[in-house]
């Protein structure tokens, strides 16, 4: 989206924002690492419904956890938001 966002490289980590370029590079690294882990580790089958369901559910739960974690910094509805 071209907007600054939190990355592990922000100051302070997890609270400060990084530039949109750092955000893009961090996201691309995560995509590449996830692909490498899924395609090279274990016996993951891209066409197996169970494997894809587990991947989707894991992504959804992890995304919800991250949304709750970082939502308070970006105007999201979070119980601890100021």
Image (cartoon, grey):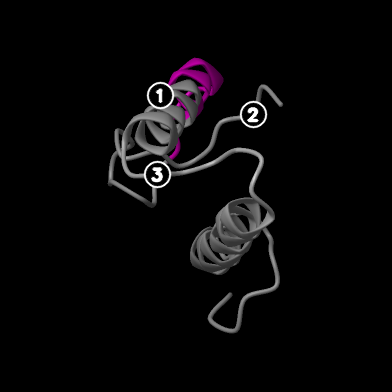
Within 10 Å of disc 2 (Cα), the crowding (few <14, some 14-19, many 20+) is few
- Marks 1/2 in contact by CB < 8 Å: the verdict is no
The mark total stands at: 3
Q: Which residue is mark 1?
A: 29
Within 10 Å of disc 1 (Cα), the crowding (few <14, some 14-19, many 20+) is few
Residue at the image point whose x is 33% and y is 44% from the top: 42
The quadrant of the picture occupied by the C terminus is: bottom right
CA separation in Å, label 1 and label 2 = 18 Å
Nearest to N terminus: mark 2 or mark 3: 2
Q: Nearer the viewer, residue 66 or 80?
A: 66
**9 lies left or right of 2:** left
Nearest to N terminus: mark 1 or mark 3: 1
Residue 43, numbered circle = 3
Which portion, as a residue range, is magenta? Answer: 17-27
CA separation in Å, label 1 and label 3 = 22 Å
For numbered disc 3, what is the local secondary structure? loop
Residue at the image point whose x is 29% and y is 39% from the top: 11
Q: Nearer the viewer, mark 2 or mark 3?
A: 3
Coordinates of residue 21 in the picture (x, y in percent): 50, 15
Coordinates of residue 15 in the picture (x, y in percent): 39, 52
**Which SS does the magenta portion mostly show?**
helix
Q: Which residue is mark 2?
A: 3
Q: Against 82, is 3 above or below?
A: above
């Amino acid at each position: 989206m071209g907007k600054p966002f939190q990355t592990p490289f922000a100051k302070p980590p997890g609270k400060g924002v990084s530039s949109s370029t750092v955000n893009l590079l961090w996201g691309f690294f995560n995509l590449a690492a996830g692909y490498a882990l899924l395609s090279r580790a274990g016996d993951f089958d891209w066409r197996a419904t169970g494997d894809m369901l587990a991947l989707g559910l894991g992504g959804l739960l992890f995304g919800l956890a991250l949304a709750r974690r970082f939502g308070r910094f970006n105007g999201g509805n979070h119980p601890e938001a100021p």
